[in-house]
Image (tube, grey):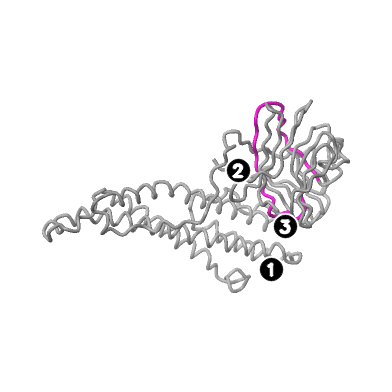
Amino acid sequence: MAGLGLGPGSAVRKNTLLQDLADKYRRAAREIQAGSDPAHCPCPGSSLRSSAAARPRRRPELQRVAVEKSITEVGQELTELVEHLVDIVRSLQNQRPLSESGPDNELSILGKAFSSGVDLSMASPKLVTSDTAAGKIRDILHDLEEIQEKLQENVTRKEAPEAQMQGELLEAPSSSSCPLPDQSHPALRRASRFAQWAIRPTFNLKSLSCSLEVSKDSRTVTVSHRPQPYRWSCERFSTSQVLCSQALSSGKHYWEVDTRNCSHWAVGVASWEMSRDQVLGRTMDSCCVEWKGTSQLSAWHMVKETVLGSDRPGVVGIWLNLEEGKLAFYSVDNQEKLLYECTISASSPLYPAFWLYGLHPGNYLIIKQVKV
């Protein structure tokens, strides 16, 4: 960590780098607004005088192309930097249990590197909200991943107009002498075809196991480092499970779960009447897909297991079509891939359901914002 300027008492180098990238982005945006004249480059066969006369009209278009290329490069640099920081925080999260002094200092510095001096309209309004060092790591990682998603969305929004501009320049007779912007972008997942039915449910605290914790926005559930002193309730799971508050009794619904930070998990649906001492998929009123942590992905439906393979999905999309009585699970990391589909006939409302088994402290699942 010392090599990245994140050790106790060291300078916050990442803050300076992020500020510099943000400033470059703003300057490029201002330049592109200042030079918005759509004049094309002069034809190759035009005279020197006509070229000279056309030069003032040519400059804004070339400037626009150069600036848009600069914006693309800055966006790529930001994306790479955030990916690098995500890796750093994940490696820190996987280290031995943190002490109460040094790691907290490192985390506060890392938090300041993102919260001070850099306004990209991407960061979450909260950065560090947990009291423990492990909680701070989890909060920072969650915010970094949100920034990562929004950077990717920003690049995706730019792809269409840039491709259109490139096509217009290629079609213009005089465009052969004009430099074209670099159109290379990393492959990004398109908006989900289920986006119009997307929901983002929240965890129900009454059903929450005492071995789990929920974030302030009720969309991240984490395995606790110690049992939580929740009030006893007959609605609370005795195993490390939780339901969401939203009752789904009709219509079509779709939500996504980020499973990348949990080594053993199951996600699916269950009725509210599911026995609190049973586990997801092993009852007649629940269904799920499950990663065993041993290179095996399975589906559980009607108390029967179907082995799906050894590929682990990083993000699982759940499609519940109550109009047709169908439930489907998709892997949606980069593109939608059907994992399992089954028919259901629910006599009572269904609730999004989660199981974080293995009880590895710090493991967590996130109900994601669906890409629209």
Q: Is residue 252 magenta?
A: yes
The residue shown at (68%, 63%) is 104
Amino acid marked by disc 2: Gln
Residues rendered magenta in the picture = 241-265
How far, Cα to Cα, is label 2 from label 1?
34 Å
Quarter of the figure that contains the C terminus:
top right
Provide the residue designation for mark 1. 102
Q: Which mark is residue 369?
A: 2
Name of the residue lying farthest toward the bottom: 3
Q: Position of residue 85 (x, y in %)?
A: 59, 62
Residue 359, image quadrant: bottom right
Under circle 3, the secondary element is loop
The residue shown at (24%, 51%) is 173
Q: Earlier in the sequence, mark 2 or mark 1?
A: 1
Above or below, comparing residue 370 to residue 44 in the picture: above
Under circle 2, the secondary element is loop
Q: Earlier in the sequence, mark 3 or mark 1?
A: 1
Provide the residue designation for mark 3. 132
Under circle 1, the secondary element is helix
